[in-house]
Amino acid sequence: MQKAIKPEPAPAILEPIKDPELLASNMLRYWEESSKVLSGVMDKVGPFAPTPEMNEAARAFGEVAQHWMTEPHRFAAAQQQLAGEFVDLWTRTLTRQFGQETQPLAKPDPGDNRFKDAEWSSNPYFDYWKQAYLLTSRWSEKLVAGTEGIDERTRQKAGFYLRQLTSAASPSNFPLTNPEVLRETIATSGENLVHGMTQLANDLERPGDELKISQTDTGAFEVGRNLGTAPGKVVFQDDIIQLIQYAPATPEVHRVPLLIVPPWINKFYILDLTAQKSFVRWLVGQGYTVFLISWVNPDERHAGKTFESYMREGILAAADAVSRATDTRQINVLGYCVGGTLLGTTLAWLAARGEDRFRSATFLAAQVDFTKAGDLLVFIDDKQLTALEGTMAAEHGVLPGGKMATTFNMLRPRDLIWPYIVNNYLLGKKPLPFDLLFWNQDSTRMTGANHAFYLRKFYQENALAKGELDFAGQRLDLSKVTLPIYELATKEDHIAPAKSVYIGARLFGGPVQYVMAGSGHIAGVVNPPEKGKYQYWTNEALPPTHEDWLEGVTEHPGSWWPHWGRWLGMQSDGMVPARTPGEGLTVIEDAPGSFVRVKS
């Protein structure tokens, strides 16, 4: 039985407009600025032409539609179900309007911040738009997931591009259906929209052919001032790396040093963010001698640098320098993300040659098997790779820095694109300072030769995992890699999914400690113990599937760092007096060095 309640008070957005004349004037300014922005966009992008992504989306949606048309009775039943839900929703909305309590037909998922404003639930108007959107988007996602007769790659593509559309279509993205935007518009007499349009115009003027949406206050941060500030020296340099040796923080250090290989897709200081979040500072505080590669931000001079170049002039050159600096033949090594893929390839190459340069290896959110590589596989086929190679050739042999940043943002458009469009362009606010998002926007270029090899040989062919990769004169076999390995995956990773990392972990031939941390590709890795956030799971066994592994896990609260630190200590052969950066090498400049400061 429905419970009678008092009629709800008038929503805040219906408060009288304080200055109708000023609101009208600002709306006129808004439309004038909008016209200028649209004209500027047309001048910048030229005549409309479908992009490769648009063509892929159309093809995937076309295949889904074609299969549903062969089963009209199923499609009609699906449509009837959606229509019935809308009738039910409309009935419940009318019931609320007459002052009676109803239960919502659709609720946002936990953590969906688009609808956190109280009026999305308290005001029947906004509640209707919210629920209508949730019903429609979930219905369409189920339709794609339930399509019979299509291959899984097409289903994955259709689902990915559908998420782009449904994220864009959220009522939170439009002024008339977003309560916060409407309140701000009335409170400021439309100044928020005018200011937002000005910010959009400024973002469109930034270099490049893509809109670069500001995610943070970039003026609040500077590498070397409040990011990447762990004390150390650049002690080696070649065409593609600077090698940083960090100053010790303890009188004694572990005898075996650690070399960190970060991804070249972004800059290394994600591992030395602020002082409170610095993985590097934590490591030196635990008594480790830490060396870290800072990759060059390549330009046309580096266009011919290949994946093999990154191995020889990157990992191997750095390892030689570390051994000279510390007088140790074997060192510990850590690879993060694509740096881990390069590390796995290097270990297999060394194993094929019978060399044992490293004592142990750690992989952080890194893949060596790509069969379950997630939504990035959407972009991997001959047509799209050929188009990308053409783009890199036109850009003098490098991939512009913003391309990969945009791709990664598309993996989570609800969180990494649309909230900033609403904040910056509709609410007219400047984004808040956030160190992680500053790093995310500080993108790097990539050499075409390296990137094309990486995408084709790893993502498309999965040649390393299959034992079919001929590389630098050797046929590679991961089972010949027998040194101790610590493999970290993160539970909500959209770039290196935990299942994908697990499949790769089982390909190595030696002892592997596989651990899964909470959160995602960045927050799950950069998780200082002092924060007490998230958790991690362990299981000493490596059964055939990730699902089997999960059945036997033990959950531990907090950061995985101490667990790994204990493991690394067992690979590090006791203690020796602390080492001064530059011993056995030449000090070139202070950390964080000059390579990391180069902007794209």
Image (cartoon, rainbow, N blue to C red):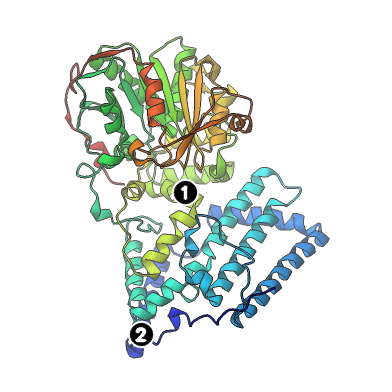
Q: Residue 150, how many percent across, how many down?
A: 72, 47
Can residue 238 be seen here? The reply is no
Q: Residue at x 56, y 56 (%)?
A: 109
Callout in the foreground (2, 1)? 2
Q: SS for tag 1?
A: helix
Q: Alpha carbon of mark 2 to alpha carbon of mark 1: how far? A: 38 Å
Question: In this view of the protein, which residue sits in the foreground, 507 or 42?
Answer: 507
571 to 364, vertically: above or below: above
Q: Residue 199 location, x and y as percent?
A: 32, 67
Amino acid type indicated by mark 1: Thr
Residue name at image x 49 percent, y 23 percent: 513
Q: Residues within 10 Å of mark 1 (few under 14, many from 20)?
A: few
Q: Residue furthest bottom?
A: 21
Place of residue 135 in the rendered image (x, y in percent of width and height, measured from the top left): 64, 64
Q: In terms of depth relative to the viewer, which is nearer, 32 or 432? A: 432
Q: Which residue lies at the image location 35% right of the left edge and 79% below the top edge? A: 187
Of the residues under marks 2 and 1, which one precedes in the sequence?
A: 2
Q: How many marks?
A: 2
Q: Position of residue 551 (x, y in %)?
A: 62, 32
Instruction: Name the secondary structure under disc 2.
Output: helix
Residue 23: numbered disc: 2
Q: Is residue 236 above or below residue 576?
A: below
Residue named by callout 1: 407
Query: Tag 2: residue type?
Result: Leu
How packed is label 2: few (under 14 Cα within 10 Å), some, or many (20 or more)? some
